[in-house]
Image: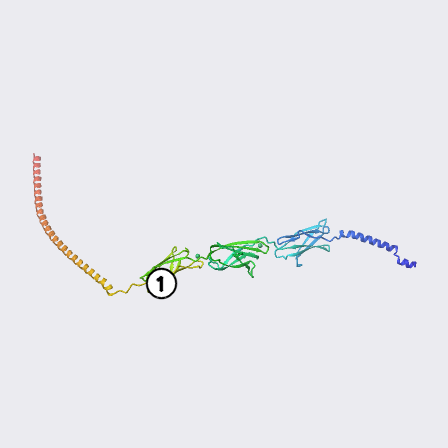
Amino acid sequence: MLNKTLEKTPSLHTLLAAGILAVVLIVAAAVLPLAFAAPTVATDKDTYEPGDSLSVSGTAAANALVSLQLFDPDGVRVAIAQAEADAAGAYSAANIYTFSAQDPTGTWTVKAYEGGAFATATFTLRGVVDTTPPSLTLNFTPLKAVYGKADTFTITLTADEPLQSAVIHVNQQGAPLVIDGKWAASVEAAASPEDPARWSGSYTIMEGYDGPAQVHAVGIDLAGNKGEATATFQVDTVAPQLTVTAPSATTEATVTVTGTVDDPDITEITLTYDAAVKTVSVSEGSWSATITLPAAGSYTVQATAVDAAGNVGSSPAVSIVYTPPPPLEAEDIIGPIRADISDVKGGISDVKGGISEVKGSISEVRGSISELRDETRALSTAVSSLTVYVMVAVVLSLVAAVAAIISVVTIARKVVLK
Ligand SMILES: [Ca+2]
Ligand SMILES: [Ca+2]
């Protein structure tokens, strides 16, 4: 029994060996974490966005080399780096990766390997936070300089980014903004199925108003930023007013018709007189036309004009009764001719008297010429007689002169000879 008991009782050696093993295990448990510590790793932020750079730091064995690897949410390794721990086991690696807008958002992982062990850290990459309001423009289709009565057109709001919502309001000058408790001028805008940045709706001009209209649009981008845009367009729902003035009765087929139009931008009107149509130019709101009525009868004359917005205005219609004078009798034609012949005869008689007077004058001129001739002859005779007298006088003068010279010479000689 004793042997059996002894066989079942541990020996002193066995107890000693078990005690030593326990001590070694306790010591090993206390020492090993220091000698073979697993590395640690941490990122400098919890959340990054495109443009940010990733820096990590951690601990490892003193002076150990730490391998760092970066994995995106899909498990794709996108970067590797290395860091060296200092004597105290601390390491860091700055800017091991810079995130771009193309990087997938979500949970990323960085792993640090050292001495056959590794540590992991996770962080979040989110998209760029949009704080920029959308830039909006407004367009009208069809685009008109002036929109007229009941014109319907499309107002399109275009943004530089997709919009989650858009509201368009129109304020026609003078028109009520609210009718029956509803926004009278709101436009039901909807996004284009192909382009969430384009929203449009149709608008119908409210009748009875004239002048500029304002459009105000608000668009909200996907991040909730609000953009605004304004535009104006011109409204004219008032038809031009015209007058027409014409003689109520005429005996002439050709008559002059005049009138006015109140719209200073209208340059021509259309004049109708029954089936006939004539386009007439307008100058400073007035117009004048000469029309020829084709036959006797009563004519209805009316002027019509269209303004830039397409509004049509017409003058009141006026009547012209054309009654041509009765046809001419034979005496109506012969009588004036007879009077004309009589006048011509009187004229001829006057001409004859004139000729007679001219003849008398010619006769008188002839007599004068004859008298003049006689006087000329007498004058000629007188001149001839005078010529003889002058010559005799000259000869006598010469003789007297010679005698005088001879006397002087004779006297001189006597003096000299003495
Ligand atoms: Ca934006
Ligand atoms: Ca008008």
Give the quarter of the image for residue 12: bottom right
Which residue: 90% across, 58% down?
A: 5
Query: Tag count in the figure?
Result: 1
Which residue: 91% across, 59% down?
A: 3
Residue of label 1: 299
Say whether residue 288 is visible: no
Pick whichever, 66 or 52, lies toward us. Answer: 52
Ligand 1 resides in the quarter of the picture at bottom right
Pick whichever, 274 or 283, lies toward us. Answer: 274
Give the quarter of the image for residue 165: bottom right
Q: Quadrant of the C terminus?
A: top left
Give the quarter of the image for residue 329: bottom left
The residue type indicated by label 1 comes to Tyr
Which residue: 81% across, 53% down?
A: 24
Residue 148, horizontal then vertical, whole percent: 46, 58
Q: Viewed as shown, does residue 52 lie left or right of 349?
A: right
Residue 215, horizontal then vertical, whole percent: 51, 55
